[in-house]
Amino acid sequence: MTYMQLNELNQNYKKSIMLWLLTLTVMVFLIILIGGLTRLTDSGLSMVDWQPILGTIPPLNNNQWQSVFNDYKLSPEFIYVNKNMTLDEFKVIFWWEWGHRQLGRIIGLTVLLPMVYFTVKHGVWIIKKYGLIFLLVCFQGFLGWYMVSSGLVE
């Protein structure tokens, strides 16, 4: 491989890393924005059950919606704040929270999958240099789960 080919390969690699980090930056901005709107709409506790895998599928029929709504009715937020909420009103806050959680999952995958790819392609030093990003995303997911679970008790 000539120096010119090696330099071109290095430039493509740098562009890929930069695109990856820019994408993550935009996604983090979006999740902050959606998280703020979720908070402003009081939607943050609408999903009382945290299911990392199965939680990606929203209720698909009226029976499932009623079941999720019945679970929400047992939460302190419903009992003390939203006791007159209808199923249609619940669906609005549910979708905000669901969207926020989906974006969080996508961010996790957007950190993990390229990091694995770059590590396999370019070496373990990628994890050393960018692994903290993955740990911070995992920690933020844990904090989100903790905030919701702690808000579901009196």
Image: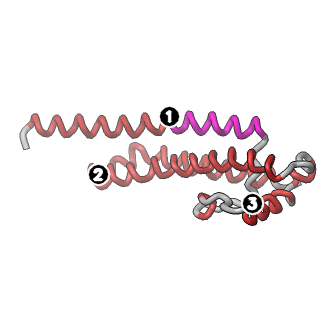
Mark drawn on residue 65: 3
Residue name at image x 71 percent, y 52 percent: 146
Q: Main secondary structure of the magenta part?
A: helix
Type of amino acid at the residue the image marks with label 1? Val
Residue 75, position as x, y percentages in the image: 85, 56
Residue 108, position as x, y percentages in the image: 51, 50
Residue 137, position as x, y percentages in the image: 54, 47
| Horizontal side of residue 121 vs 4, given as left or right | right
User: Reading the chain from its start, which is encountered first: label 2 or label 1?
Assistant: 1
Q: Residues within 10 Å of mark 3 (few under 14, many from 20)?
A: some
Q: CA separation, marks 3 and 2?
A: 47 Å
Of circles 2 and 1, the one toward us is 1
Quarter of the image with the N terminus is top left
Q: Quadrant of residue 7?
A: top left
Residue name at image x 85 percent, y 50 percent: 86
Type of amino acid at the residue the image marks with label 2? Gly
Q: Secondary structure at mark 3?
A: helix
Nearer to us in this view, 86 or 24: 86
Q: Residues within 10 Å of mark 2 (few under 14, many from 20)?
A: few
Nearer to us in this view, 82 or 152: 82
Whether residues under marks 3 and 1 lie with C-beta atoms below 8 angstroms apart, the answer is no
Label 2, on which residue? 123
All told, the count of numbered labels is: 3
| Horizontal side of residue 103 vs 118, given as left or right | right
Label 1, on which residue? 26
User: Reading the chain from its start, which is encountered first: label 3 or label 1?
Assistant: 1
Taking the magenta stretch, the answer to whether it contains residue 115 is: no
Residue name at image x 59 percent, y 58 percent: 56
Q: Is residue 51 above or below residue 111?
A: below
State which region is magenta: 25-41
